[in-house]
Amino acid sequence: MSFLPARQAVQTCVLSRRWEDLWCSMPCISIDQQEFDMAALGNMNDLENARLMFHKAPSLEMFRFHVTRPYKFEVVSRWFRRGIMCCPAVVEISRSANTHCYVLPHLGPRGCCLRRLHLVAIYLDKTVMQHLSSACPVLEDLELDECFIDHPEISSTTLKHLMVKDYISYSGKVLMIAAPALVSLYLVSNAVQWNWGGVLLNDMPSLVNAKVYFKQDGPSDPPQVPCKILCSLINVRYLELSGLDTLRALNEDPDTFPTFSNLRTLLFNGCDLSDDFQMLVCFLNNTPSLEKLTLQYCKLPEGSKKRKIMENLERISIEYHDTLTFQCPNLKLIEIKYKQEDAHQLFSLLSGIWRNLRKTTIVLTEA
């Protein structure tokens, strides 16, 4: 019954009084405005008030709330507070793009059972962010998707999985993440607010998997200050870097480049390697345990496209063999996914770049 739409669940209970207790003890409550048209919003208010007030289960497995059209803020806040009073383990709150931005009310002591929180396009004020750790002492999974963060600081001693995607901060402050127990991190950030250096990560000794994607909507100048987050990712076993702007934002001096002693899998997805693979070489020289490298639809050096392949193949091989030297003794597999138009320059470069990887299997896959 928890998986039925709200109106259908209530209609089912009306048909049989034997199911009244079931309706009041459902382990999952889902409020979705899409079930009601504008004329029926008053009925929706009465229905959801009744569902939340008479709910008898000692705790909720999930509380899901989706707003699709403008509605009174005090009503929405009341629904949320009553849902939190049921001590849910999972909370999912989202809104459609054409609605007003709702402010997440304070979680209060009833957030003590919350293990997973997923918010989409919700405004988070300073108080909510500062009390996240104390109000949710067992929170392990946090997803913030296109949220407005007034005070961009995420602090939690219990958080294990974190996804921050396209956050917005009008103040332009640096996003600070302090989560020492974090196991997996997924960070997608837009250049409008991160300004190439707008992310700061504290030490994360338990971090195993990390995915980082820095992007921008249009062309811009190279970053003035690199984003210093690589040092916080040195313990990961899996690292995925995506987007044309990501490597530019993470640009590090080769002399101070951190060592990733535990890294086993490295994936570049759509990254810009037009710096003659210098950032790639920095990674390969500082990943002694790397076993698998994936280059997926990356941008190749522009110079290679201007050469005539057959006439300059030998010269290109010698050139890249001399400039690209690295030590990666445990590398077993290199997987390269490329587009058809990049085939010629890719094959010409391989003979020089991978000459010292005779024990490494190279798999080429055309899109």
Image (cartoon, rainbow, N blue to C red):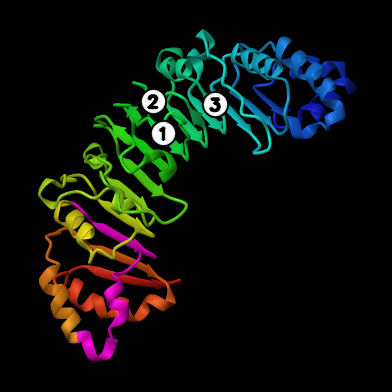
Q: Looking at the figure, which quarter contains the N terminus? A: top right
Residue 291 lies in the magenta stretch: yes
Q: Is residue 278 above or below residue 34?
A: below
Q: Earlier in the sequence, mark 3 or mark 2?
A: 3
| Residue mark closest to the camera, 2 vs 1 | 2
Residue drawn at (63%, 18%), measured in percent from left and top? 80
Question: Who's the residue at 51% across and 27% down the image?
Answer: 117
Q: Secondary structure at mark 1?
A: strand
Measured Cα–Cα span from mark 2 to mark 1: 10 Å
Work out whether mark 3 precedes mark 1 in sequence or the reverse, and give the earlier one: 3
Task: Say above or below: 165 vs 49.
Answer: below
Question: Mark 2 touching mark 1, by CB under 8 A?
Answer: yes
Quick one: label 2 or label 1, which is nearer the N terminus? 2
- For the magenta stretch, what is the residue range? 289-313
Which kind of residue does numbered mark 2 sit on? Answer: Ile
Instruction: Look at the image and tell me whether residue 216 can be seen.
Output: yes
Q: Mark 3 belongs to which amino acid?
A: Tyr
**Image quarter of residue 31:** top right
Q: Residue at x 37, y 38 (%)?
A: 185
Q: Is residue 51 above or below residue 322?
A: above
**Proximity of marks 3 and 1: CB atoms separated by less than 8 Å:** no
Residue type highlighted by circle 1:
Leu
Rendered image quadrant of residue 221: bottom left
Query: In the picture shown, does residue 46 fall above or below 244?
Result: above
Which residue bears the numbered disc 2? 154
State the residue position of label 3: 123
Q: Which residue is mark 1?
A: 162
Left or right of 121 on screen, residue 239? left
Q: Which residue is nearer to you in this view: 234 or 104?
A: 104
* Nearer the camera: disc 3 or disc 2: 3
Relative to the observer, which residue lies in front, 96 or 59? Answer: 96
